[in-house]
Image (cartoon, rainbow, N blue to C red):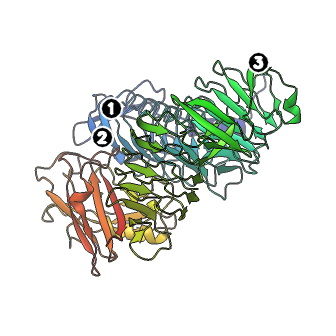
Amino acid sequence: MRKETPAKTLASALAALATFVAPAATWTDGEGIEWTYTVLPDETVMLGDESGSGRAVKADTAGVLVIPEKIDGKTVSTIGKRAFRSRVYLEGVVFPSGLRSIKTEAFKSCYALKTLTLPDGVTEIGESAFEECEDLKSVYLPKNLKVIETKAFANCYELREVDLPERLEEIRDMAFSYSAIPSAHLPAAVTNISCKAFLGSVAMKSFSVDPANAFYGGKDGMLLSKDGRTLLLAPAACENVIVPQDVATIAPNAFYQCRLLAVITLPESVEELCDFWIMGNDSLMRVVFLGEMPICGEDAFSGCSSPLMVTVQKERASWAAVGETWSGIMVRAAAAAGQENTEHYNGIQWTYYVQGKEAVVGSTRFGYTAIDPGESGKVVFPAILGGRVVTSIGKEALRYCENVTEVVISSYVTNIGHSAFEGCAALRSVEFPQNLKTIGRYAFYNCPSLSSVRFFGEEPEVGEYAFYGCSSPCRAYAPDSWQIDGYDWQGLSLYRIVPTNAVYYVSLPVQTFFRLGSTVTIQPFSRTGNMPTQKDLENIASQVKFLPDDPAQDARYFKGVATVNADREAVVTAALDLEELEFSDTLRDFNGQMLSQPAADSVEISLPNAKSGFWYGVTVSADLSSLDTVPLADAAGCATAEGLTLTVPKPASGTAFFKVKVSTQRILTK
């Protein structure tokens, strides 16, 4: 056996010493809580032990847990493997500012956790760290986080709010599987996202991508390669999908477990379908090909529902000789131009005809409707009929369908024809799609129950008497971009609404105090995905502050003075300025105990920059999943030239979580 030299022996000993982890020890805080901890080689503390077999706190933990900044004089930097696993009564956690790492399964199966605000110093969230936190509704990730590990937030069924940090590079398998997240915005730094990252998240409606991202692009809510040639991932909530033009390849698992998916339309540009591209879709009924026959992997249609039908353009050379089946799938020729056809969709038999490459809902014969006139209740228009995109609602399509109360119009519709909804006596309201260009004569003539119509795109061309005989007054809600003078439009009362990216949400930390000298970051976000501008943030920062209801209480309580940093976040820094009443709730002292002094019955939020002629409303919620605790009408007012102060009733006492919504609406009625 070869002998080591003294130098090598010394080096080996030093290396072993550098990785040596001390045995677990215990420490009791001022509240009598006994903590199990391990001293790491860098002289910081990890809660729990090295093996992950011990718990950080021996006794069962309920309510809000405040993790100490230091234990036995050493900074708490790490939450160890399984340190708080299955603490089923734990509702909230205040993390120490020096925290850097949260290890595997650290909070797995903490069913009652409701919200998480992680310090910006955290750079590691381990595999399954928060898996099965079934009541978790919102997560505020640290800005320095680069990787979201496998199953980190899997099976968090109520999770709706997550902002992916700007420095994030990778989202691994099932990171947010089976969540309730409605949309995801990929920052510029992301280089890899697993096709199963949002597996089973049936609320997911859209992906968007920072334009500066070098690897990914987004279009029509779908995740594409940067060049737009490969469709990588479709949101799980998609139902009737039209793949964006210029996509040539559909990647494996692109539509994996999109369990609501009914129809996919593939553009002329599609050249290849990879194996398992639509695997695991029990509801898929039809795939429509607008172009030539693509190259297909051997398992391209593996795992699809039965029966599945393929609709093709028989005039295409590659499809001309195809019989009744192709790749084991039933084949149907697309409807021919000029012919009237029928097709079932959502329980209704629809009549339609083809114009060019598009479909029109309605009949070619005078006096015939697109559906049975006896249909009642809500009617959802199909996006695809006969393998063609529905772009028009034809003349008299629902004329005198007197029992229809609500209609949902496809986002692809650009034209509503002459008398399309004439005489729909029970129809109450209509939302028009973004791309609508024309509304024909008498389109909504004699609809006496119609009291509200809402537009999202530019002003359409409207035929005469289109809304004649509607409810009085019938309101038209329109974007602020409409260039219209006066208060009436087409005989309707016009209400202009500031775009929804002017409505922001601010999540306040679990407690209404911070230690003196500390800094807390507040990250505003918008449900629309449009982040606030610098000016918006400055306005938010001036409105959200903190103060106990009784300034005579201990001076350790303070209000926050907010500024805006380079990362477009509102930063609240400790101060002792007690000049004005601020947002407050039932307070906790520094040991987490409830104080006897209750919160004020109401709070005032001042909007000094409120514009004259605008209505402002503030809604406060104790439940992060809802903003309905205090109705808008209870805290709303019209601004004067001097600004506006709104008085807001507080949420139920004892709550520890808040959300503030400031909304703006300009009314232009007479």
Give the position of the C terminus as an image quadrant. Answer: bottom left
Whole-percent x, y for residue 157 in the image: 43, 32
Count all numbered tags in the image, as a single digit: 3
Which residue occupies the foreground of this view, 495 or 2?
Answer: 495
Query: Up-down: is 41 above or below 4?
Result: below
What residue type is disc 3 on?
Gly
Image quadrant assignment for residue 546: bottom left
How packed mark 3 is, by other alpha carbons closer than 10 Å (few <14, some 14-19, many 20 or more), is few
Q: Which mark is residue 340?
A: none
Asked if labels 2 and 1 touch by Cβ distance under 8 angstroms, the answer is yes
- Point 45% across, 63% down: residue: 478
Q: Sequence order check: which comes first, mark 1 or mark 2?
A: 1
Identify the residue position indicated by label 2 in the image. Answer: 65
Cα separation, mark 2 vs mark 3, equals: 58 Å
For label 3, the residue is 328
Q: Nearer the viewer, residue 519 or 202?
A: 202
| Three-letter residue code for mark 2 | Leu
Per the image, the residue denoted by label 1 is: 57
Q: At which x and y percent is residue 453? A: 42, 56
What amino acid type should be assigned to the residue bearing mark 1? Val
